[in-house]
Amino acid sequence: MVVREFLEAYNSRDLERMTEVIDPTFEFRSRFVGIESVHRASEGFPRTYFEMLNEAYDRFEIFLDEYFDAGAAVLAAGHAEWRGQASGLEGETLILPAFWLRAGKLLRAETFTDRAEAFDAVGLPLR
């Protein structure tokens, strides 16, 4: 599954592998880099994204245990574990990344921290 491949590459910071599974028009909306930010393949994603992420976090990993099929989208649910770069504080945050696909590639991704908002974004009833 392309979503799992993307997430494995994300956690291992394998930028080349990430680039292989995204569409050239890929757009990523993150709530964890620059509070809320948009990153595009046409503007250097994933390199620019991880540069910003590494400025804010010493460690940031995603662990997902649920996947929901929404037709042209996939919603995943789990948690992110992180450690702040400057503060050294550690934490765990609920995370629900949504992925939209086209022709076997990721077209768009957006992270959510609110379950109802995430399910609504992909057109699924709350579970």
Image (cartoon, rainbow, N blue to C red):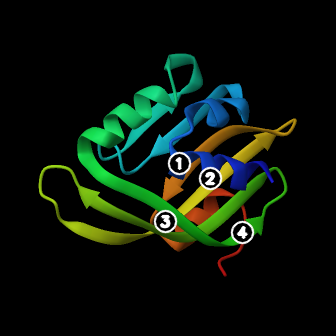
The answer to whether residue 62 is above or below residue 78 is above
Callout 3–callout 2 Cβ contact below 8 Å: no
Q: Earlier in the sequence, mark 3 or mark 2?
A: 2
Give the x, y percent position of residue 49. Answer: 42, 34
Tell me, for residue 95, which label it has, or none.
3
Residue most extreme to the bottom: 127
**Residue picked out by circle 4:** 67
User: Depth check: 121 or 58 in front?
Assistant: 58
Give the x, y percent position of residue 6. Answer: 66, 46
Tell me, for residue 8, which label it has, or none.
2
**Residue picked out by circle 1:** 12
Give the x, y percent position of residue 37. Answer: 39, 38
Q: CA distance from mark 3 to mark 2?
A: 16 Å
Task: Please give left or right for residue 97 compared with residue 124 in the image.
Answer: left
Give the x, y percent position of residue 93. Answer: 38, 70
Mark 1 vs mark 4, foreground winner is 1
User: Which quadrant: the N terminus?
Assistant: bottom right
Circle 4: is it few (<14), some (14-19), or many (20+) Cα within 10 Å?
some
Q: Secondary structure at mark 4?
A: strand
Q: How many marks?
A: 4
Circle 3: is it few (<14), some (14-19), or many (20+) Cα within 10 Å?
many
Q: Earlier in the sequence, mark 3 or mark 1?
A: 1
Q: Secondary structure at mark 1?
A: helix
